[in-house]
Amino acid sequence: MRSLPVKSRSFQFSHWTFMFAEIAVWSFVVLLVSGAALMFFYDPGMAQVTYDGPYAPLRGLLVSQAFDSTMHLSLEVRGGLLIRQVHHWAALVFVAAVVLQLLRMFLTGAFRRPRTRQWLIWVALLALGMFAGETGNALPDDLLSGGSLWLMLSVVQSIPVVGSWVAGLMFGDAFPGEQVIPVMYGGHLLLSALVAALLVARELLVRRNGHSRFVASLPARRGARPLMAAATTGMLIILGFGFQIAPIWLYGPASPTQISAGSVPDWYMGFLDGALRIMPGWELTLGGYTLSLAVLVPTVVVPGVFFTALAAYPMAERFLLARRGRRDALGRPRSARRAARETPARDVLDRPRDTPVKTAIAAAGITFYGLLWAAAANDQLAHQFQLNVNTVTIFFRYAVLVAPVVAFVVTRWICLALQESERHVAEHGVETGIITRSADGGFHERLEPADREPAMLSAGQR
């Protein structure tokens, strides 16, 4: 059988959820273009200079070259502030699109063979995007990013064995030192290059394996990629032009003894902030060394377990399904490797209701993440609702353990109920709303066979 030409396997917009990957791709293109423009004006140096720019409240203060060049770019270079804000918004949208793409692939089973490598690429893109965002946020060397350096130092030092060594590589002999911004700048460029390489690899895999599809999806629209590129770029320009973000002149230069009031991380790092706030102040002493579990668990262990579980889920599911089908049609035993190898590759995606356990796992994960994200605002919640902040913190400690279990049970029950409803419709027919009178004088609703519904839907789509 002759294989399809490469051109026919490119992006096809046959379902609205497929746009998440395209938004991620074109957001990163905007990141590359705007980042390249910013490189011409940004100086990652830590040497102290006197600010003499147009912003009067800061004039005469000693600032780093990184902060001074960012102020010059923002207030003196024509279009510089727009480029900075578009770059920042593109980073936020990129991570959001990657998260939605992973959620879509998980709920629909798009991580199965032959697309397991694409799933792993998206998991790696999420981790790299978060790290790249944090390194980029530190580059202006303003008071907000300077406060996050304290958190980075605490997280790195909490890592057993290698923590102090890594902290020395990042900050040198003293905090904040004179090398952290150049190190962050180099790391930011390296992470961006890795993201670009992974996106190229993902595109090649899509062209080779083809796109997955839904059974009742709309007809493919081959001209959707240019439209998605224009829409994504235009929306990012609108966000950069109309919505202020990272006004470093209001924060001022970084200082190791100060932090801006009400500072919060970008949205994708909010769950780490929440985990830090609700984690008890536990410590563990082993062999004369003290481990700060209050920092290690929420910032290293929880993300490590999360990304490991994401990456390993396709293999775990394949292994469990292989164990379930250890015998062939003749009753002969099969090895797990053989059973997994004989599992056919699928292009048709699952409906979430058809895989209730997997969908319930996704709901439990979203609930856990959402509660950690909400816990990052425990002080604001206590203030707005006039509660004790300790009471709010204790509530979130129990909620992150109980609520995911409740979400799992409820979601699985909903999926099973939807399946039962479909079986009822398949057996008895589709309600039409037309009431007829029978010969014995009774009134009955006219039912149509269930197999006529897809045809009616297809006619409506055409």
Image: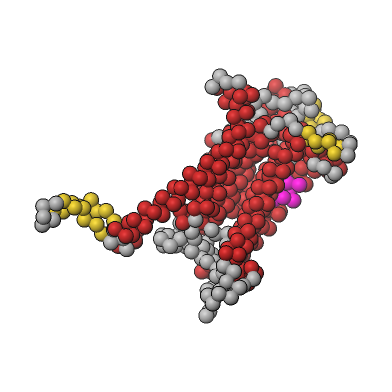
Magenta highlight range: 187-192
Q: Nearer the viewer, residue 291 or 213?
A: 291
Q: Residue at x 57, y 26 (%)?
A: 381
* The C terminus lies in quadrant: bottom left
Please, is residue 232 above or below residue 256 in the view?
A: below
- In the picture as drawn, the residue positioned furthest to the bottom comes out as 1
Please, is residue 296 above or below residue 4 in the view?
A: above
- In the picture as drawn, the residue positioned furthest to the top comes out as 386
Q: Residue at x 70, y 21 (%)?
A: 57
How many numbered markers are drawn? Answer: 0
* Whole-percent x, y for residue 82 in the image: 60, 39
Horizontal side, residue 213 vs residue 126: left or right: left
Q: Indicate yes or no whether the magenta region holds residue 264.
A: no
Q: Residue at x 52, y 80 (%)?
A: 1
Q: Quadrant of residue 85?
A: top right
* Whole-percent x, y for residue 56 in the image: 70, 22
Q: Nearer the viewer, residue 314 or 48?
A: 314
